[in-house]
Image (cartoon, rainbow, N blue to C red):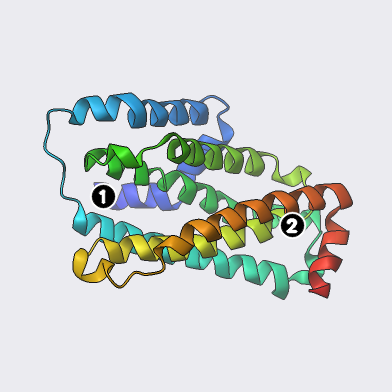
């Protein structure tokens, strides 16, 4: 009964609502995340044996593949199936629940760092890693809180591309968790970082153009492509 209630509470989106509505709760969570990643976690694990989380990692990473796959599908549908509503403010408001669950997934991805700390892989918890997760969560939080003021779907393209790349990234992590017998076949690891850098560059350029020329012009450019 208690487990069912917890699952219902999580899936209902009420956690996301609290984080999105409370101006101070979300920053507190992010500060706690940074403190755990940089100081509290390593201090707690200093004299402890690293946890063996192979099974949990496989399940978690495949879950992320499914979630990001669904987000990719949803973005494609919004961009092309409902293209006639592309720039309507009303349509942005109607998709708010979808944005809310995207935010929840970004918060879930903070578990990447938690797993590194518990496995004593502190070398993986770099400044870039912690900054990336903190910044992405913060930007997502800010965007959703202000989404009704954007007046267009200029953020959907970036979200969709990001989710697609995360599918590839978490697929690699899930397969790598099976051990050396599988990792020797994962020749495409080096390309993931290159694709992420390309995506980051594209996102900056695309969002800049979108906010400068407006949603209608961006919609026409994408249709021409």
Q: Residue at x 20, y 56 (%)?
A: 54
Q: Residue at x 34, y 42 (%)?
A: 124
- Crowding near the residue tagged with mark 1, few <14, some 14–19, many ≥20 C-alpha atoms within 10 Å: few
Image coordinates for residue 106, horizontal then vertical, percent: 48, 47
Q: Earlier in the sequence, mark 1 or mark 2?
A: 1
Above-or-below relation of 49 to 99 = above
Viewer can see residue 67: no
- Which residue carries the number 1 mark? 3
Q: Is residue 57 left or right of residue 158?
A: left
- Crowding near the residue tagged with mark 2, few <14, some 14–19, many ≥20 C-alpha atoms within 10 Å: many
Q: Is residue 40 left or right of residue 27?
A: left
- The mark total stands at 2
User: Toward which corner of the image does residue 66 lie, by quadrant?
Assistant: bottom left
* Inter-mark Cα distance, 1 to 2: 37 Å
Viewer can see residue 195: yes
Asked if disc 1 and disc 2 are in contact, CB closer than 8 Å, the reply is no
Q: Is residue 204 left or right of residue 30?
A: right
Quarter of the image with the C terminus is bottom right
- Which residue carries the number 2 mark? 153
Image coordinates for residue 135, horizontal then vertical, percent: 55, 37
Q: Residue at x 82, y 64 (%)?
A: 219
Looking at this view, is 190 or 83 the one in front?
A: 190
Above-or-below relation of 212 to 70 = above
Q: Which numbered dot is residue 11?
A: none
User: Toward which corner of the image does residue 176 lie, by quadrant?
Assistant: bottom left
């Amino acid at each position: 009964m208690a487990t069912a209630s917890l699952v219902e509470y999580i899936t209902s989106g009420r956690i996301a609502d609290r984080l999105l509505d409370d101006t101070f709760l979300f920053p507190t969570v992010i500060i706690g995340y940074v403190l755990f990643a940089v100081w509290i976690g390593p201090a707690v694990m200093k004299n402890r044996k690293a946890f063996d989380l192979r099974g949990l990692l496989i399940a978690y990473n495949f879950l992320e593949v499914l979630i990001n796959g669904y987000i990719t599908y949803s973005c494609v549908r919004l961009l092309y199936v409902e293209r006639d509503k592309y720039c309507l403010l009303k349509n942005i408001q109607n998709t708010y629940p979808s944005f809310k669950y995207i935010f929840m997934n970004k918060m879930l991805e903070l578990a990447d760092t938690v797993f590194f700390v518990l496995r004593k892989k502190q070398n993986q918890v770099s400044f870039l890693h912690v900054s990336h997760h903190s910044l992405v969560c913060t930007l997502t939080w800010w965007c959703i809180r202000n989404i009704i003021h954007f007046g267009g779907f200029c953020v959907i393209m970036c979200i969709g591309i990001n989710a697609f790349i995360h599918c590839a990234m978490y697929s690699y992590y899930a397969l790598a968790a099976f051990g050396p017998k599988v990792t020797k076949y994962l020749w495409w690891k080096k390309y993931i970082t290159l694709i992420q850098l390309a995506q980051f560059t594209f996102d900056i350029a695309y969002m800049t153009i979108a906010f400068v020329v407006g949603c209608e012009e961006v919609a026409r450019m994408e249709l021409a492509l």
